[in-house]
């Protein structure tokens, strides 16, 4: 009765009427108390029970019961929202509950309910007929499939989101993704769509591609996809609601001319790719060795050895080589100086991460123990951590790195604190490290 009689514009306005706290304040006990209702809802929708009020609300969502649909969908996505906020690394949502999420099975059952997933996918294809809050919920519910074990997630994505067979070709996969992307672009260009919905539409695409093809191919497909301007427009409309770093990181995922490194360089903190500890190829034509020695004059190109430098000089570099002077800010100078005189611990970390790109950070354990590789499962978390590493030791990035690693490995807090201090020469919990 609460669902069908509800009238609202934003679901948060009446969550108290449904007995729901705000997601960031929700405890495991409160979620567990709702399990009987979720069990009935999922069973009714799975079995297409005609007399079910839940099914009636969805079938009439754009006509007789639009407000009820807003509330029902918010209720359906609620457990997933709580889990996402508990695991958030983006600092966009605030979590006030310090508990390990213990309702993952409920979120997974929602993600596997074909009636819900098919309805949400169909709703995105007819976005003009539905309230923007309904569309935002559909995006979040569909994205929850990416939280399933990868093989299961791939099966549900192909069948229910992209409408291709489980053995569909790569071309069919990309075609199905482009149809999804087009529907999402239609959504984010609406004036009534919120900041969170615009961001989640981008992250949903990235999560889906990472599930299907892996992170490297996902980024490549995103950058070759159409309607980039629509997604960038959706972000720019809410730019005042982001920090600059957040805005640039989300924008990076939909533009076709920027890499992570270029976004970082655009922040006026790191000018050279070498400062990122990234592999730089020898500038001599035909040589693929690492260029570890920069030209002493222009400081732009690098060579693997003196012989290659001499040959490239004769081949034409002498005509373009000019002394380069970059105007730098005090913070940039500090970062470059720190990298130029990197501690042995930082150099070892950089070398290790360059050789093991799937690992985000290595915690060096006491002698005799195997070191611990830190891997952040969320693509945005991986990208943000890489950005923070490139900016450190400028505050507050060493402190942010510490917080993210410690959250994932709380038992290693003291060890991580000492290791970061050895690498960057600053205690990550000191006032100097926290200063913005």
Image (spheres, grey):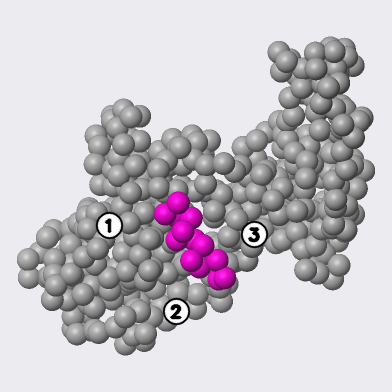
The alpha-carbon separation of the residues under discs 1 and 2 comes to 26 Å
The quadrant in which the N terminus is found is bottom left
Q: Earlier in the sequence, mark 1 or mark 2?
A: 2
Q: Nearer the viewer, residue 417 or 72?
A: 72
SS for callout 2 = loop
The region drawn magenta spans 229-241
The residue that mark 2 highlights is: 22
Compared to 232, does 367 lie above or below?
above
Q: Earlier in the sequence, mark 3 or mark 2?
A: 2
Q: Position of residue 423 (x, y in %)?
A: 85, 49
Outermost residue on the bottom side: it is 17
Q: Earlier in the sequence, mark 1 or mark 3?
A: 1
Number of marks in picture:
3
Outermost residue on the left side: it is 50
The residue that mark 1 highlights is: 124
Q: Position of residue 220 (x, y in %)?
A: 50, 36
- What residue is at 18 percent from the left and 80 percent from the top? 4
- What residue is at 62 percent from the left and 37 percent from the top? 358
Decide whether residue 215 is among the magenta residues.
no
């Amino acid at each position: 009765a609460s669902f069908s009689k509800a009238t609202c514009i934003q679901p948060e306005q009446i969550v108290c009427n449904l007995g729901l706290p705000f997601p960031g304040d929700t405890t495991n006990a409160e979620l567990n108390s709702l399990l009987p209702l979720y069990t009935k809802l999922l069973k009714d929708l799975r079995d297409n029970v005609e007399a079910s009020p839940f099914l009636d609300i969805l079938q009439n969502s754009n006509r007789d019961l639009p407000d009820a649909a807003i509330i029902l969908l918010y209720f359906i996505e609620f457990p997933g929202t709580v889990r996402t906020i508990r695991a958030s690394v983006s600092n966009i949502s605030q979590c006030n509950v310090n508990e390990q999420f213990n309702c993952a099975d409920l979120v997974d059952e929602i993600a596997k309910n074909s009636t819900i997933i098919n309805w949400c996918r169909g709703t995105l294809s007819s976005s003009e007929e539905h309230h923007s809050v309904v569309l935002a919920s559909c995006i979040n519910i569909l994205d929850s499939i990416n939280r399933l074990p990868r093989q299961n997630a791939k099966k549900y994505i192909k069948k229910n989101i992209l409408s291709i067979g489980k053995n569909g070709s790569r071309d069919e996969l990309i075609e199905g993704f482009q149809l999804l992307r087009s529907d999402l672009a239609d959504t984010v260009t609406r004036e009534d769509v919120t900041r969170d919905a615009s961001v989640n539409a981008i992250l949903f695409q990235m999560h889906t591609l990472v599930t299907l093809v892996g992170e490297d191919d996902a980024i490549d497909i995103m950058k070759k996809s159409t309607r980039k301007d629509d997604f960038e427009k959706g972000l720019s409309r809410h730019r005042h609601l982001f920090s600059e770093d957040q805005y640039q990181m989300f924008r990076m995922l939909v533009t076709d001319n920027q890499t992570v490194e270029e976004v970082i360089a655009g922040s006026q903190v790191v000018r050279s790719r070498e400062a990122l500890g990234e592999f730089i190829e020898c500038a001599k034509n035909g040589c693929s060795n690492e260029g570890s020695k920069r030209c002493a004059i222009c400081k732009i190109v690098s060579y693997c050895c003196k012989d290659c430098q001499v040959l490239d000089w004769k081949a034409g570099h002498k005509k373009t080589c000019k002394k380069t002077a970059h105007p730098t800010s005090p913070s940039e100078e500090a970062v470059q100086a720190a990298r130029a005189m990197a501690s042995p611990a930082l150099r070892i970390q950089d070398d290790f991460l360059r050789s093991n790109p799937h690992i985000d950070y290595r915690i060096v354990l006491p002698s005799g123990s195997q070191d611990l590789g830190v891997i952040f499962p969320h693509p945005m978390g991986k990208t943000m951590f890489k950005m923070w590493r490139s900016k450190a030791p400028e505050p507050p990035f060493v402190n942010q790195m510490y917080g993210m690693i410690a959250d994932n490995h709380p038992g290693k807090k003291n060890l991580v604190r000492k290791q970061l201090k050895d690498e960057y020469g600053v205690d990550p919990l000191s006032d100097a490290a926290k200063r913005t």
